[in-house]
Image (cartoon, rainbow, N blue to C red):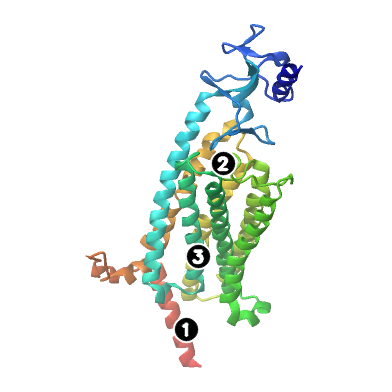
Amino acid sequence: MIKILLQIALLIPTCFSSNPCCRNNNAISERRCIDGSPLQGLSCPQKYLIEKDSDIEVDSDDHLNIASSRISPNKYCVSSKNDTVVYIVCFNEESTGNTIYIVHAVLELISVFFIVITIFVYLQLRDDLLDLQGKSILHSIAGLALSFLTLAVNQLLPGGLERPYCIVLAYIIYFSMLYSFFWLNVLSFHIWRVIVKPRFLQILTPYWHYIYCGFGCGGPTFLTIILSIAQSMNESDSHPGFGETKCWFKSTKTQFLYFYTPMAVLLCLNLLYYGSTIATLWRSLKTVDEKKDKVLKYRLLLCVKLFFIMGISWIFELLSAAFQESNPLQVIWHVTDVLNTLQGILIFLILVVFRKRVVRGLADRSFCGIRLPGRWRGAADDECGEIEEELNLSETHVQKN
């Protein structure tokens, strides 16, 4: 009697599974169903069999979670063999997934390297660059660097961390990502406030530094506290599941609830700020003289560059998460994911290499025993010339008054 009950208990997962390997929930033998019929639902040429244990779980989306790999429902099936629940998994999915993880981790570490260089350069030129806008940029890219670093560790050490350390790593990734998003929102709001100049905000002028810090640091802290409360409620349907199957959320649903939803809200706000800023600049182009027109054109171009760096890549990240099961789009999502991991290089190019104001500031400076060329002091582009021209126009206006 006990043996019969045990066999029934073992077969329950296959009876209720949405991915049975055999018709009528038959068991398998020698990679075929016991009635002689072939396995159903799997079209991949190479498969491997794995027995169910405590490290394997099927989440609410019917994805099979094995260590750090998340296998879609069309890439595995469930059955029983010798009174044991087993999964048959497409081999290519696992192999490709591991390769992608390694590639992403290497690219993320490259991005971290270039972001660290960017932060170092801006700290060296703090007198010229670290106004409220410059500080917002540094906070945002610092959060991005920390998130990329922890993501790389997570991807290069699959299953290599004990559960407590895995949970800590997940919290660091979550907080640092949100920290970067919130400071991106601070930056877009700052650009909007400076250019649009809404009158109802002028009374807060002396306090913007504290307001920015409160929002940029307090927002991710508050959401992380909410997440930790949900993590402690094991019976909740909205349990994040940190450390259960991987060092991140256990399912796409919880990831959207706690991570992608706040990110989408912040990105929408960024779009509104940039749209309003560009509209204001465009209207100003028709009402100012030719000299000031050049200054406003540069500011318009700067807004477009900042939006491209800090917004477009994360919009693609959100779309790839929403449509990750769409096979025709998999190649596109792989490309956008790679571009997303290379943000650090793009940030370095835009904020350091192509920004001649920074190049001029680095002239004749020494780093690690290497003296940078003095001829860099003569580097000039539209930004340098237009900023100097704007300052000259302002000084002339003051003298006339």
Q: Disc 1 on helix, strand or loop?
A: helix
Instruction: State the residue lying farthest toward the front.
Output: 2
* Percent x, y of residue 302: 49, 64
Depicted 322 relative to depicted 7: above or below: below
- Asked where in the image residue 248 lies, by quadrant, the reply is top right
Depicted 44 relative to depicted 352: above or below: above
Q: Residues within 10 Å of mark 1 (few under 14, many from 20)?
A: few
Cα distance in 3D space between marks 1 and 3: 30 Å
**Residue at image mark 2:** 246
Mark 1 in CB contact with mark 3 (< 8 angstroms)? no
* Residue sitting at x 47%, y 29%: 95
Q: Please tell me the numbered disc located at residue 139.
A: 3
**Residue at image mark 1:** 394
Depicted 348 relative to depicted 244: above or below: below
Q: Check disc 2 and give the amino acid type.
A: Lys
* Percent x, y of residue 152: 46, 47
**Of residues 70 and 332, the one drawn nearer to the viewer in this rendering:** 70
Q: Check disc 3 and give the amino acid type.
A: His
Q: Which of marks 1 and 3 is in front?
A: 3
* Percent x, y of residue 192: 59, 69
* Residue sitting at x 68%, y 78%: 200
Depicted 330 relative to depicted 106: above or below: above
Q: Check disc 1 and give the amino acid type.
A: Ser
Q: Which of marks 2 and 3 is in front?
A: 2
| Quarter containing the N terminus | top right
**Of residues 384 and 107, the one drawn nearer to the viewer in this rendering:** 107
